Image (tube, helix red, strand yellow):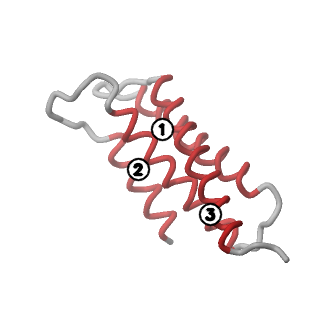
Amino acid sequence: MVLAIWLIFLLVVSLIPLSSPKLPPHSDKVEHFIAYGITSILIFRYLAAKGRKDRISVFSVVIASSYGALIEVLQGLTPYRQFSFGDMAANAAGALVFCLAYAAYIKLRNPVT
């Protein structure tokens, strides 16, 4: 449920017109990095709760990155947003870094004996 709400939230805030104050160039990449990092962790937790054990980190990163790419394409179809490969790279990087860190945390917390 949390994952579905988060994905809908990302979609809405990514596609509505925004009037934001002037920010430093490329500062939005940090927002993308964090947002899709959170997305990959939520996907990881969802898959783990469903009993998935194999390649859960890979699936989480691929799904989160693909969702970010889809949203970038949709932004390119709007007159007030634009498609960005830089945003896609930030999405994928955030998904990868957060997911690997979370997987390492889980492994340290629950070592296999």
- Mark 3 and mark 2 lie on one chain; the one further toward the N terminus is 2
Separation of residues labelled 3 and 2 (CA atoms): 25 Å
* Residue at numbered disc 1: 71
Separation of residues labelled 1 and 3 (CA atoms): 29 Å
Graded by Cα atoms within 10 Å as few (under 14), some (14 to 19) or many (20 or more), the crowding at tag 1 reads: some
Graded by Cα atoms within 10 Å as few (under 14), some (14 to 19) or many (20 or more), the crowding at tag 2 reads: some
Separation of residues labelled 2 and 1 (CA atoms): 9 Å
Q: Does 70 sit above or below residue 45?
A: above
Q: Name the spot of residue 19 as percent of width and height, x first.
A: 17, 35
Which of label 3 and label 2 is nearer to you?
3
Q: Residue furthest left?
A: 21
Q: Camera-side residue: 20 or 38?
A: 38
Tag 3 near tag 2, CB within 8 Å:
no
* Residue at numbered disc 3: 105
Report helix, strand or loop for mark 2.
helix
Disc 2 marks a residue whose amino acid type is: Leu
Q: Camera-side residue: 7 or 34?
A: 34
* Residue at numbered disc 2: 10
